[in-house]
Image (cartoon, rainbow, N blue to C red):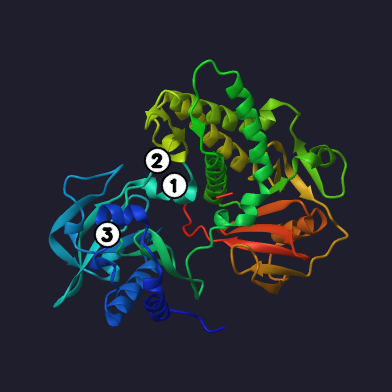
Amino acid sequence: MNHAYPSDLALFLADHWDLIEPSDAEVAVHGDAACQELPPPPVLESLVSTCYQASLMREEQRTVTFRIIVCEPERFPQEAGPPSGLHRLTFNEPRPFSAHELRRLSPAANFHRSLIGVRLDEELGPQIWGIVNSGPRWLRSLHGGRGSAPPIPPCLVVSVSRPGHVEVSKGSVTVGQLGEGRIFGPSMDVFESHWLRDNFAPIRAERLALHKEARSHATTPWAKLDLDVTRIIDQHMMKRIIAAVRAFHHGGTLVMVPPERTEDLCARNPFIFLKYKFAEGEPRARFRTLIVNMMNTLAQIGGREVEHGSIKRVGWKDYEKSHDARLASLDEAIFEMSHLIAALTTVDGAVVLTKRFELLGFGGEILCEQTEVRQVARALDLEGDLIKTESTHGVGTRHRSAYRLCYDLREAMSIVISQDGGVRFVRFKDDHVTYWDHQATFTFSSRF
């Protein structure tokens, strides 16, 4: 194996930088001026290499993690700050850009909340000019939750989240990564795949029917509901579960099955033995109750607002920005539900849910003892149309169990979270057990 290093990442960035468009929000706030341009190749390689070297250091026995942004401090308004803006703090005198300086600054420029500001001096080279406080909202794209993050300028951003792992972005949009001696392109976000969205479409249709029934009994006007809002809330629920499981550093397996298999899987069956089963009733189906209540409440609140002479249509942006106490309470309840599910993965065995997010039980022992899956297909694109066949000998028991289950119970989907934070979606597709490496890029300790 030929390992990749910072110079290889710099070459990758030079080839792919112009192919990446910054987000609309970033352009709207900061413009799309020349700060999007990459530094000259020698400077770019030096920037990436310095960050890589800093990632291998320790600061008082702590792992060195940080984010840098390469642009002039004037790009940040002086009066702004979190949660809706970026707060710049400029040093009285610039500091040299070096691995040791990044190591020393990393505890103060907390990875979750700040970036280290760097500018390129024509004579002195890269210089650290200060700290930019972003707040933690940017993590919600990974962890789920309400509240939009303040847009950052579409400049060069280098993030170090663990030793030897460097990610480079244009603003908030990933361009390339270096990790485990390999170069990766933009993260594969499985939640953006059509197959995952279509897999849960019948469940969203069920919720819509319940919402329409409640609407028919309303005594006041309700707003029209953007049907995509429940898909996005499902997505954020799953992101919260995955983020919480990763934070435990224990690893775990989530198995999602069709609702019509509930009775079979809760009885004696050849697929999975649930050590801890939950009794049938509303408590184990609480997520659907919460999501339908959220739909009804959002429509009811929106019914009081008029837009262009008629009742407005409400969706995710309205849910995200609302200060209504009822929606805030429902959002907190969904958050707690996701953490409850994540906590169940700390017990050995799989957590089993239906695709309605009905919680059947945990401590699941995957059986399928007569099945041996020697090869699986690794998806190279979101839809799994491009694949590469791999042997299963290089993975652990947790992954092999998920492969066997998805081979025998072909309507199931497994999400396997490794102890080191890797996330893998597994299902049967086109005569293969297929997996997608969900590259939720950052590892932390603390659309379908």
The picture places residue 85, in percent across and down from the top left corner, at: 27, 46
Amino acid type shown at disc 1: Arg
Left or right, residue 62 beside residue 438? left
Q: Is residue 108 visible?
A: no
Q: Earlier in the sequence, mark 2 or mark 1?
A: 1
Q: Pointer 3: residues within 10 angstroms few (<14), some, or many (20+)?
A: many
Q: Answer with mark 2 or mark 3, whichever residue precedes in sequence.
A: 3
How many neighbours does mark 1 have within 10 angstroms: few (below 14), some (14-19), or many (20 or more)? some
**Horizontal relation, residue 379 to residue 311: left or right:** right
Q: Mark yes or no: residue 93 visible.
A: yes
The disc at residue 116 is 3
Q: Which residue is mark 2?
A: 147
Out of 123 and 295, give the one closest to the viewer: 295
Amino acid under disc 2: Gly
Q: At 71% from the left edge and 57% from the top edge, which residue is drawn?
A: 427
Q: Quadrant of residue 165?
A: bottom left
User: Foreground residue, 311 or 366?
Assistant: 311
Q: Are marks 2 and 1 in contact (CB under 8 Å)?
A: yes
What residue sits right under mark 1 in the picture? 140
Q: Secondary structure at mark 2?
A: loop
| Nearest-to-viewer mark from 2 and 3 | 2
Vertical arrangement, residue 2 with respect to residue 272, above or below: below
Q: Element under label 3?
A: strand
Q: In this orientation, which residue lies closer to the viewer: 161 or 302?
A: 302
Residue at (56, 49) in percent of width and height: 242
